Amino acid sequence: MDIVMPKMRSKRIIRITAIVILLLLITCIAFFYVNDRPGGLADRRMSKAMGMSETMHIPIGKTAEEAIRKFRNNDDSLQIIHQEPVDGGIILFKQKTGQENNSNLQMEYARKIIFGWKWAWGGGYSIGESSQFTSALDYMSIPELSHISTPFPMLFGHILDPAIQRVTVEFEGNEKPVVAEAKLVEVGPESIIWFVSLPSSATIPYEMKGFNDKGELVTHKQIDDPNGMGAMVLGER
């Protein structure tokens, strides 16, 4: 009798523990569903951060590419040229091919959720070639969203002149300017993109600088618009 009772108590404790774990698991799944479903709590926060009066219904995809394609209404004219893993998800760089005398680039961030992937911020630009000057690089700045966890603010663009071998973005720190080093990625024959993710403490204005292989400054521009885009030429100050 003394042996049977402890065994019965032990089995009951195991059953109760299993039930508690199961209930916690169900609660967690229910929370994530309510949060991440299209039109859920996460979409409400995103819509509010974007200044929208109505709540977006951001679709869920099995992959990051599918989630972005669903959100952007299945735009198949854009080709993925680079994928960059980041904390919480992945950034996809996309480009529309077959457009002569035009520089364009789309950057999309998708976050990983337990049910798949969701679009979580991004944008793009298209800049026609000028007849007055030849661009050395182009750029776009995308700000962070208030109270939304993303790898932003971020600047990105194309390297259009092989003289540019290094790109930096400077901004004011607490005591002295902070220099962020851009990553350069070759995405095709004679095609290079650059991008740099800045800390949330980074504030406008930004100072973009391009250097040659000797470390000499060959182009320089101040960015005053957190949503700005444009192009820079060699020798620009």
Image (cartoon, rainbow, N blue to C red):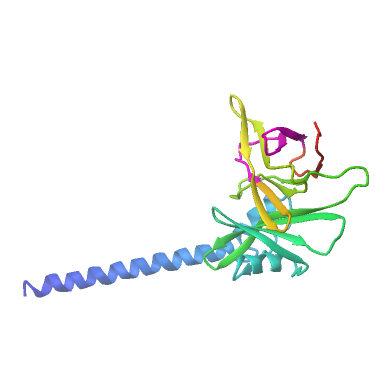
Instruction: Examine the rendered structure and indicate whether residue 51 appears above or below residue 17.
Output: above
Q: Is residue 158 left or right of residue 3?
A: right
Using the rendered view, name the quadrant where residue 135 is placed: top right
Instruction: Examine the rendered structure and indicate whether residue 188 appears above or below residue 233.
Output: below
Using the rendered view, name the quadrant where residue 229 is placed: top right
Residue 9: x, y in percent? 18, 70
Q: Quadrant of the C terminus?
A: top right
208 or 137, which is in the foreground?
137
Q: Is residue 16 left or right of residue 4?
A: right
Q: Quadrant of the N terminus?
A: bottom left
Residue 211: x, y in percent? 70, 37
In the picture as drawn, the residue positioned furthest to the top comes out as 175
Residue 53 in view: no
Using the rendered view, name the quadrant where residue 191 is placed: bottom right
User: Does 116 appear in magenta?
Assistant: no
Picture mark count: 0
Q: Residue at x 70, y 69 (%)?
A: 70
Q: Residue at x 50, y 66 (%)?
A: 30
142 or 81, which is in the foreground?
81
Residue 46: x, y in percent? 66, 54
Residue 98: x, y in percent? 83, 64
118 or 219, which is in the foreground?
219
Residue 158 in view: yes
Give the magenta range.
196-224
